[in-house]
Image (cartoon, rainbow, N blue to C red):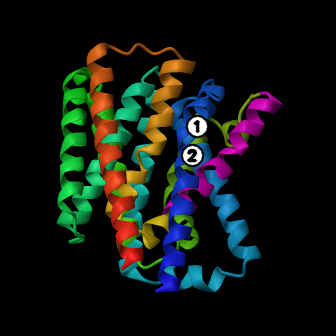
Amino acid sequence: MDHHRQDMRKGYGAALGAYLVWGMLPLYFRLVRAVGPVEIVAQRVLWSMALLLLVIIVGRRLSLLRAHLASRATMLALSASAALIGVNWVVYVLAVNNGHILEASLGYFLNPLVSVMLGVLVLKEPLRRMQAVAVAIAAIGAANLAISTLDTLWISVVLALSFGFYGLVRKSTPVDALTGLSIETLFLAPFALAYLLYLGTAAILGGDSSIGLWALIAASGVITSVPLLLFGYAARSLPLTRIGVLQYIAPTMQFLIGLLVFREPLETAKLASFIIIWAGLALFTWDAVRAGGARRAG
């Protein structure tokens, strides 16, 4: 039981770290907006692959990587998760660099609802009555927000569904975070390399970018890999319903960055919707803390 609680604590810490990094991503992508959104994603894939393979070699985990590569079931699952995260990356960068940070944050506000429902319907995870009420309140706010942004609703829906199903696949696949993400980048690398070659061989090394911009592009390997590794660990350590609640951290940060830093417009109806969503989150969190205290007391 102590070992289980320790894993849970590490899982919460990993999830928090991942969502804090993801919450700051709009600032990073605005710094590299001179590079096209698909090219940014291609660069992320290749730099991430290089970093992850280096970590695997230094950590002497090549034999484990080869073992998973030999598993047909694992390869099928991770090819699906690679496709999901690739779509998620492209749509997110496209949204941020075209002034739709608030719409992107809506996608990640919807994502926890997708995660909770997948946890309940697919993994048969239990949901207490108060948690169900909290999810319903957040869903009402999300639905109202979606109605008020119909023209950009596809951004929010694609981001929510792609990352929700990504979390489900990773949780259901018996592979550790480092190896799983390494295989995903190996799947995506040929497509990324082909696209950069299509742009021109110079694009592989950052094109004609300044040294500062080139360094920022190279840093995408760390910015991409670290939070996904943390998320992969958290997805294996925590119930999907708990992950769904913690996921509100990143979109809240993105929302505030879009509103306060980049001055994107926010209508009264949107603000009311966000308040309803946050109320549902507060209720869900309160119930989780209360239930945890009761278990420890027992």
| Quarter residue 213 falls in | top right
Mark 2: secondary structure: helix
What span is in magenta?
210-231
Estimate the spatial distance between the alpha carbons at disc 1 and disc 2, rounded to whole Å: 7 Å
Q: Position of residue 166 (x, y in %)?
A: 37, 58
> How many numbered dots are placed on residues in this image?
2
User: The C terminus lies in which quarter of the figure?
Assistant: bottom left
Q: Is residue 122 left or right of residue 267?
A: left
Disc 2 residue type? Answer: Leu
| Quarter residue 182 falls in | bottom right
Q: Residues within 10 Å of mark 1 (few under 14, many from 20)?
A: some
**Is 225 part of what is drawn in magenta?**
yes
Disc 1 residue type? Answer: Met
Q: Residues within 10 Å of mark 2 (few under 14, many from 20)?
A: some
Asked if residue 198 shows in the view, the reply is no
Q: Position of residue 14 (x, y in %)?
A: 56, 61
Query: Which numbered dot is residue 24?
Result: 1
